[in-house]
Image (cartoon, coloured by chain):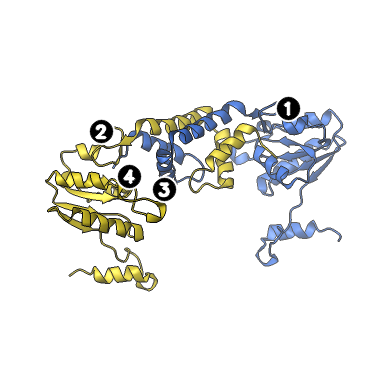
Chain colours: A blue, B yellow
Amino acid sequence: MKGPKSLDELTETLQELPGVGRKTAERLAFHILKSPAKNAKKLSDAIIAVKEKVALCSVCFSITESDPCGICADPERDKSIICVVEEPHDVYSIEKVGDFRGVYHVLMGVLSPLEGIGPEELKITELAARVKQGGVKEVIVATNPNMEGEATAMYISKTLAPMETMVTRIARGLPMGGDLEYADEMTLSKALSGRMKI
Amino acid sequence: MKGPKSLDELTETLQELPGVGRKTAERLAFHILKSPAKNAKKLSDAIIAVKEKVALCSVCFSITESDPCGICADPERDKSIICVVEEPHDVYSIEKVGDFRGVYHVLMGVLSPLEGIGPEELKITELAARVKQGGVKEVIVATNPNMEGEATAMYISKTLAPMETMVTRIARGLPMGGDLEYADEMTLSKALSGRMKI
């Protein structure tokens, strides 16, 4: 049976979202259909608003409604330490911890020759320009600890090598609550080589 | 960290959907933010369209864009057999099987004294009226096989008892591919009492 056309269309559109299969899309579509019109309107408006209002910070390329973003504009943040991440949502992950008082630089991706993403596709030139301006003591590369993230970290460290800025990499090792027995070899190897004096 | 206001609002609104927690809402919101504006517009429009265009069929109360719905308007469907279900999406589930050639009646819920849902809240009067009009040979009660669904089935059978229409209940038993060892006692009991000659 084909349902009402607009319901089928909503179901299909919802299926384009990540992690949403046919069953989930159907459940969500029926929920929207059953919920009050004002709730549906609110969701519809919120989707449009996020596309219209959110832009990239011209300094660090994280997402923001004002330019520069709240972090770049905050006089309390230490502009001499730049934490480099892959995606805007990585900024949120680190901010949630609450420890980091420096600023960010979002690459907008990661080097991936297989997907045709080279250094030109990323905000690496912009990072080098920021460092070149001076006043940056440390660049912490917080790309993900996988092949692409490691390669990107290496590339950044080479690019920034001529400048007098320390480039560091976040620690790779056993996660808290983890278990030696179940750790993969790469992680264990990184945990050993990255050992610190206690 | 508080993100851009419109992103936080979208995340919160998405969390109101069933089965969508904070993490999922964040992932979806970031996906919408990153996807092309036309995709976001399409989703936003589809949500509004479903609320504006879809209504209930005045005969069977299933959802439709035209009234009466496609099934009620279809001359090929057998109007003498009415299958009673709880919700509009149950119609889809049965239609997917493709065996049933009768028509439907959606109750828009199920008797639930705890939630204050009595017979007046359901489309039971409307069902009785349809049967009273004549020409209905059988009413198949396909409410869910749980406490509320069974109570509703009993209530419908009592309501229709004075009329000369057969009221039947879908079979309750072991699901195909199921296992006696793991079946609960209620299901096993129903499977035994509902045994058929082979």
Q: Dot 4, crowdedness within 10 Å: few (<14), some or many (≥20)?
A: many
Q: Is residue B65 above or below residue A176?
A: above
Q: Are marks 4 and 2 in contact (CB under 8 Å)?
A: no
Q: Which mark is residue B35?
A: none
| Residue B102 in view here | no
CA–CA distance between discs 1 and 3?
Answer: 42 Å
Q: Dot 2, crowdedness within 10 Å: few (<14), some or many (≥20)?
A: some
CA–CA distance between discs 1 and 2?
Answer: 54 Å
For mark 1, name the chain: A
Which residue bears the numbered disc 2?
B67
Q: How many marks?
A: 4
Q: Are marks 3 and 2 on the same chain?
A: no
Q: Are marks 4 and 1 on the same chain?
A: no
CA–CA distance between discs 4 and 1?
Answer: 49 Å
CA–CA distance between discs 4 and 2?
Answer: 15 Å
Q: Amino acid at mark 1?
A: Pro
